[in-house]
Image (tube, rainbow, N blue to C red):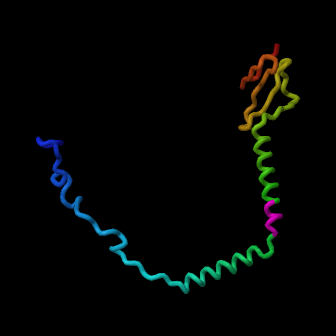
Amino acid sequence: MQCSTGTVDWVDRFGLDNFVPKRPYYDIKPREPPDYAAIEEAAKLYAKTKELATKNVDTKTAGEKFQQELQREQEKTKQAAEPVQTTGSLDFLPPGWKAYTAPNGKKYYHNAATNTTQWKKPAPL
């Protein structure tokens, strides 16, 4: 809403309370001086705990174990992503068709000659 002079009376529009400066938060709640003795005690306890935790740990061996575990997980993920060919004796498929199992467990069929993939079992010729 504009006035006839082209200016807006902001105080009238939003009220005087919105234009009065407020005190900053740090002035409202004064800080207490830090307890340096308690901080020092906590730091010493942390250092002692860290020393005891790493005293008998071979970090090189732990890193190698972590790398091996990471590689195993990547191989599992890779194997799950690859289609697994099923070789069931009850599956009678037309020539050129192969049955696979998707990572979600659902069976699908693929013909490499025609590059056709389908969920339904192909009819025998």
Q: What secondary structure characterizes most of the magenta part?
A: helix
Depth check, front residue: 4 or 83: 4
Depth check, front residue: 114 or 89: 114
**Number of numbered callouts drawn:** 0
- The residue at the point 28 percent across, 66 percent down is 22
Q: Is residue 23 above or below residue 100?
A: below
Residue 99: x and y in percent read 80, 27
Q: Is residue 35 magenta?
A: no
- The residue at the point 80 percent across, 45 percent down is 75
Q: Is residue 123 above or below residue 55?
A: above
Classify residue 105 by image quadrant.
top right
Is residue 8 found left or right of 66 in the rendered image? left
- The residue at the point 19 percent across, 51 percent down is 10
Is residue 41 found left or right of 32 in the rendered image? right
Residue 46: x and y in percent read 65, 78
Classify residue 91 by image quadrant.
top right
Q: Furthest residue to the front?
A: 5
Q: Furthest residue to the bottom?
A: 37
Q: Is residue 48 above or below residue 90?
A: below
Depth check, front residue: 91 or 6: 6
Residue 6: x and y in percent read 15, 42
Residue 1: x and y in percent read 18, 42
- The residue at the point 77 percent across, 53 percent down is 70
Q: Furthest residue to the right?
A: 89
Q: Quadrant of the C terminus?
A: top right
Classify residue 104 by image quadrant.
top right
Q: Which residues are magenta?
A: 58-63
Q: Furthest residue to the top?
A: 125
